[in-house]
Image: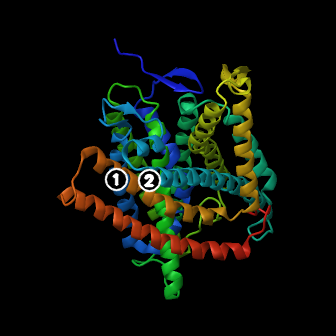
Amino acid sequence: MEKMEIGHIEGREYERKGTVWTASAHIVAAVIGSGVLALAWSVAQLGWVAGPLALTAFAIVTCYTSTLLANAYRAPDPVTGSRNRTYMEAVRSYLSPREVYMCVVAQYVNLWGTMVGYTITATISMVAIKRANCFHKFGHEANCEASGTLLMLLFGVIELILSQFPNLEKITWLSVMAAIMSFAYSFIGLGLSIGKWIGNDFTKGDLIGTVGLSPAKKTWSSLQALGNIAFAYTFAEVLIEIQDTLKPSPPENVAMKKATFYGIGATTMFYLSLGCAGYAAFGNNAPGNILTGFGFYEPFWLVDIGNLCVILHLFGAYQVYAQPIFAAVERQVAAKWPDAKFINRVHTLNVPLFNSTLSFTLSKLTFRSIIVLVTTLVAMMVPFFNAVLGLLGAFSFWPLTVYFPISMHIAQEKIGRGMPKWFFLHGLSIFCLMISIAVSIGSVVDIASSLKMSAPFKTIG
């Protein structure tokens, strides 16, 4: 009989029941964000040669380093060692205190930044639905601008409710729904792009991407495109937390490697097909977002469905990134006041819609609500934050996706300096660092441009 594996969270126990498929759903929900719909623009900046190569290269690097990170879930042995329930615990088991501090900063800034970006992105899709209906009713030349402030508040309220679920193990259904939605709007975007491509009777685009730009503008846009692609593949900051939901047989690292392969494989297929089909349809005039940039006006109902799927997907993906932040805050609070009733007294609430009960403590209700409300407020104040998100992606890709997994693998396998694998791993790390620095420069230029056109509390579609 298989031994029951028990985990601990908020002072209570739960049975780990995750499988390769539930982990794959979490990965797809975390990786395939609405950024997939901006990949046509990214390919347009790089062209028919560099665009697909960049998408493939980032997929290979992410998949490889994720397998290294999966081995760090237990220490010192990847199968029989002690569990590391968070990314930071894994870094602490293998690396120095200075690197642990670096990890904390990189991980949680990126997690929270993603929450802000998802809030803005979901709001843009909500606004796009209103505008699509307006254009259909009054014509494509009508003034259909709309504010998304109230819609952003609505998104924040829904996330506040979802935040009261205890952990990733208890919201597998939400990640499954999010994964289904991501496939749905990806197929819709792909279908609309292919339809427009066929309607054009020829393939648009150039081998080197956008033409007619100044060398500086071409450089900045190409770097921004690489930043978008790098961020689109980033999910290392939640990999350990996802792996912590897996049952112990087969070994968690084996199951997680399979889940990573399936998740990244599915992601890459969508990224390549949608990015290339969108570029073939629009050429160098590819919109920043296929569903919200109004490259398509009709059929308006299909555009509406696509944007609705984006919104539903982000409901789930937001929580995949938020739950590690909630858990970290609650661990710190529980450690400081271990006997406080405010922290330990459990309240239950029946949820008829899902035929279940929701358990929570007043501390969880308070702190999770504060985090969601602050996230929403910041998103409202800086509606151009998607540009900032590109910079966060550039900063987080190298340390979280490349540097820490490689460093922990070297420590775990005791790879000596001067060995062939040591040179390979350090060479890969240095190359990715150079990419991240260059992308950061491009992102800063994009942020400076966005600052000139932004207005606080004025999310406009």
Answer few, some or many: residues within 10 Å of disc 2's Cα (few below 14, many 20 plus, some between 14 and 19): some
What distance separates the C-alpha of mark 2 from that of mark 1? 10 Å
- Whether residue 25 is visible to the viewer of this picture, yes or no, is no
* Left or right: 362, with 108 as reference point: right
Q: Answer with mark 2 or mark 1, whichever residue precedes in sequence.
A: 2
Labelled pair 2, 1 in contact (Cβ < 8 Å): yes
Q: Quadrant of the C terminus?
A: bottom right
Residue positioned 33% across, 47% down in the render: 68
Residue positioned 49% across, 39% down in the render: 26
The three-letter code of the residue at mark 2 reads Glu
Q: Position of residue 153 (x, y in %)?
A: 78, 48
Q: Which residue is mark 1?
A: 407
Q: Which residue is mark 2?
A: 99
Q: Position of residue 316 (x, y in %)?
A: 60, 41
The three-letter code of the residue at mark 1 reads Ser
| Extreme residue in the top direction | 1
Q: Quadrant of the N terminus?
A: top left
* Left or right: 33, with 150 as reference point: left
